[in-house]
């Protein structure tokens, strides 16, 4: 079996093909713009409401090669709800490709299922030619369609939430809701049930009456199949005591609308409130204020509240809550059901913890009341002015915050102390606990403030470091945080280092000084560092007069000259005896806070002890004997090298020497000395001793030494000869 469904103007046709004789026709069933091809013997299903009709057209197109003659009207066997008609007069003759149309109508009179069969008899004549002989054959046959019809039928019922009984209801009937508390919601389920044999469509559900509304309504139109139910919830929410009515209207795709009446009544309890602690009792309304007696801090006062049910239904006090510092409730057993005219009472206690006006909130169920009371006592309130605004401390904020201040500058603000309480307050001590803060403008202590009186002090913030700088302000036992932040100080002015420059003589003691181009607003501390560069071992004698190669200095605030301790503004140094480059580089910082002021590329003073000829410092003769002595020479050679020693003897009158000038190669002993570790402690200093022994004939009573009156010496290196030193021979 082959089955298929298609929609025709809202009517569903189910086509089922059963065994039937093959016929030379193409069968097309159509309605409006919908059409479908069926086989002979197919079954069509019609859906229409009672009193309505569904119509389809069967178009039969002759596909044979002969001729068809229809001489009878269609026959319908079965339910009288079906009819079939031909639009043309009989007989109807159809040649190949011609068509005939049959109109089929379903008009049910009940919701039960209907069935019929439509037959359309015809005779087909076909001529056949064989050679020269033509024969004609006529065949009678029938076009057959099965017809099935269904009809929807709707019945109404409802189920109240209170009893869950299903109650049938006719159009125009009533759904009665039980009495319902104002603000509460009762509900009923409204059932729309299709009790017919075919599907039906609900096209609309509407409701009137301000206390009623529909919940769970489906997207409409909505098709309800046979035996199925469309259910919606009807909600009743009374807003006032009294009777409410409403109406539900349900429309279908066919047939008349149905209506359902609604009724309900609102009931409510009503609570009234009064303060029993007064004479006579004082009525209070939700949203009003309940005032408690002024009470000394640390003590308590109590009032009694009555809740009376003045409504027409039982009322439940399910919750009583209180909020606000200093306010508390007496013990209550809840929930508490109050019949009409019944009441309950409870106490509110006020125990202030600080002076001044205090507020709270009382909530009974959903009714809210404000609470007010005044605590008696002193209450100090602190505030300060910043950025044109007054900032009051308290409520989690117990800090005085300064704007960021540049190191070397200051910021000050006015701090106000006020007695906002009801009794005098006394402060005995005020001061700064820590941090770069000072206070001024203090009143004579101890100070007593009357209620609403105040005094002001000045807090000054002078940061000495970059970054957070916290402190504390102490007022007796009260500690207030002081919060500030230092930002980078102004850049250091340009500076100059006065002292030697270029090539500087070895073994000298020049002086240096350091001067700023302009005064700096805060005191500066610094270090002048000496560094030595060169290919030769550094001379340890190269240092400052204070010892070492670093020296501290200070520059007082608003001055320009560096002071090197007891040396004053001029500091001596030793250049040493080794060829090298000496560099003096300063560093700077604020004296308070040690904030670095050193430029990224600090200027330096640089000078050079250049390689030079030897310099002789001292010469002496030793180890004297009748035949000789030792010449000892002390000096320095900045390249740390020596080449030769030249000795010149001067003879006494009447004496002569074969040779009076001698040159001695000292390069080897020089190299040994200067390459030794021991020599590095002496820079390029050297001491050389050369013994001389003389032979010859002298007069009786004379010595060889009497023949020599003096000796002179020079030393040479690769750069030349030194100065000459001379010593007399004793």
Image: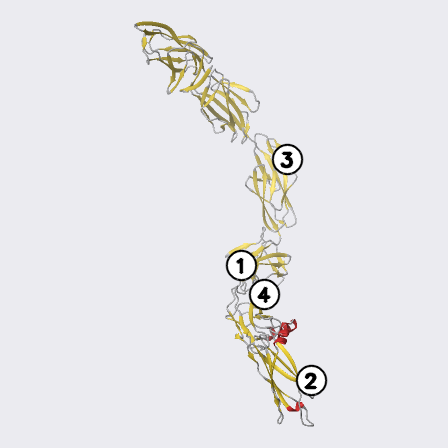
Q: Position of residue 297 (x, y in %)?
A: 64, 50
Q: Earlier in the sequence, mark 2 or mark 3?
A: 3
Relative to residue 548, is residue 14 drawn left or right?
left
- Judged from the image, the secondary structure of the residue bearing numbered disc 4 is loop
- Judged from the image, the secondary structure of the residue bearing numbered disc 1 is loop
Compare residues 332 and 204 and report the one nearer the observer.
204
Name the front one of labels 1 and 4: 4
Q: Using the rendered view, name the quadrant where residue 621 is placed.
A: bottom right
Judge whether 60 appears above or below 728 on screen: above
Residue at coordinates 64% horizontally, 90% vertically from top-left?
A: 708
Judge whether 247 appears above or below 504 on screen: above
Q: Where is residue 313 in the image (x, y as percent from the top left)?
A: 58, 29
Judge whether 628 appears above or below 592 on screen: below
Image mark count = 4
Marks 4/3: CA–CA distance = 68 Å
Residue beneath disc 1? 404
Q: Residue 592 carries which label?
A: 4
Question: Is any atom of residue 93 visible in this view?
Answer: yes
Question: Is any atom of residue 559 visible in this view?
Answer: no
Residue beneath disc 2? 623
Residue beneath disc 3? 334
Q: Which mark is residue 533?
A: none
């Amino acid at each position: 079996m082959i089955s298929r469904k298609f929609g025709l103007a809202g009517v569903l046709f189910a086509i089922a093909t059963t065994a039937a004789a093959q016929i030379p026709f193409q069968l097309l069933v159509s309605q409006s713009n919908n059409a479908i091809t069926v086989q002979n013997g197919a079954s069509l299903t019609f859906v229409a409401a009672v009193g309505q009709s569904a119509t389809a057209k069967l178009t039969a197109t002759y596909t044979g090669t002969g001729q068809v003659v229809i001489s009878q009207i269609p026959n319908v066997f079965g339910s009288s709800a079906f009819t079939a008609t031909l639009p043309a007069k009989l007989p109807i003759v159809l040649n190949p490709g011609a068509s005939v149309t049959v109109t089929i109508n379903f008009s049910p009179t009940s919701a039960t299922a209907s069935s019929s069969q439509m037959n359309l008899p015809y005779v087909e004549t076909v001529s056949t030619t064989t050679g020269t002989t033509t024969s004609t054959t006529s065949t009678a046959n029938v076009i057959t369609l099965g017809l099935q019809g269904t009809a929807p039928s709707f019945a109404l019922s409802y189920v109240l939430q209170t009893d869950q009984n299903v109650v049938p209801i006719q159009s125009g009937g009533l759904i009665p809701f039980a009495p319902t508390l104002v603000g509460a919601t009762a509900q009923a389920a409204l059932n729309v049930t299709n009790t017919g044999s075919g599907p039906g469509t609900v096209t609309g559900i509407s409701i009137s009456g301000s206390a009623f509304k529909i919940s769970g309504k489906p997207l409409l139109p909505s098709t309800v199949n046979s035996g199925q139910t469309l259910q919606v919830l009807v909600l009743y929410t009374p807003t006032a005591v009294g009777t409410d009515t409403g109406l539900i209207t349900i429309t279908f795709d066919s047939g008349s609308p149905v209506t359902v009446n609604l009724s309900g009544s609102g009931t409510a309890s009503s609570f009234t409130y009064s303060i029993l602690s007064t004479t006579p009792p004082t009525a209070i309304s939700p949203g009003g204020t309940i005032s408690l007696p002024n009470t000394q801090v640390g003590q308590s006062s109590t009032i009694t509240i009555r809740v009376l049910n003045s409504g027409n239904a039982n009322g439940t006090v399910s919750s009583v809550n209180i909020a606000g510092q200093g306010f508390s409730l007496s013990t209550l057993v809840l929930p508490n059901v109050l019949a009409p005219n019944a009441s309950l009472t409870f106490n509110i206690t006020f125990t202030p913890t600080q002076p001044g006006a205090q507020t709270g909130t009382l909530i009974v169920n959903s009714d809210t009341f404000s609470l007010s009371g005044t605590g008696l006592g002193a209450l100090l309130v602190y505030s300060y002015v910043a950025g044109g605004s007054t900032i009051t401390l308290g409520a989690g904020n117990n800090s005085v915050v300064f704007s960021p201040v540049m190191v070397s500058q200051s910021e000050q603000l006015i701090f106000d102390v006020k007695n906002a309480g009801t009794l005098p307050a006394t402060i005995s001590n005020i001061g700064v606990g820590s941090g770069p803060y000072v206070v001024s403008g203090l009143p004579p202590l101890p100070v007593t403030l009357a209620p609403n009186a105040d005094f002001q002090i000045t807090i000054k913030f002078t940061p000495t470091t970059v970054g957070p700088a916290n402190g504390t302000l102490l007022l007796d036992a009260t500690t207030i945080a002081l919060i500030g932040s230092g930002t980078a100080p102004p850049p250091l002015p340009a500076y100059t280092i006065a002292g030697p420059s270029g090539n500087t003589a070895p073994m000298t003691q020049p002086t240096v000084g350091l001067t700023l181009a302009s005064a700096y607003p805060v005191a500066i501390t610094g270090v002048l560092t000496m560094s030595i560069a060169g290919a030769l071992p550094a001379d340890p004698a190269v240092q400052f007069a204070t010892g070492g190669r670093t020296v501290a200095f200070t520059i007082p605030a608003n001055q320009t000259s560096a002071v090197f301790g007891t040396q004053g503004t001029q500091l001596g140094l030793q250049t040493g005896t080794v060829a090298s480059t000496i560099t003096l580089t300063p560093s700077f910082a604020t004296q308070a806070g040690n904030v670095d002021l050193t430029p990224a590329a600090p200027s330096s003073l640089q000078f050079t002890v250049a390689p030079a000829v030897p310099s002789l410092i001292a010469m002496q003769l030793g180890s004297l004997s009748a035949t000789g002595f030792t010449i000892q020479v002390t000096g320095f050679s900045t390249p740390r090298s020596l080449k030769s020693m030249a000795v010149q003897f001067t003879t006494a009158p009447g004496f002569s020497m074969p040779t009076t000038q001698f040159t001695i190669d000292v390069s080897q002993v020089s190299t040994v000395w200067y390459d030794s570790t021991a020599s590095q402690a002496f820079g390029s200093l050297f001491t050389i001793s050369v013994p001389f022994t003389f032979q010859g004939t002298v007069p009786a009573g004379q010595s060889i030494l009497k023949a020599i009156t003096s000796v002179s010496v020079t030393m040479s290196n690769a750069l030349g000869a030194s100065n000459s030193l001379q010593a007399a021979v004793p």
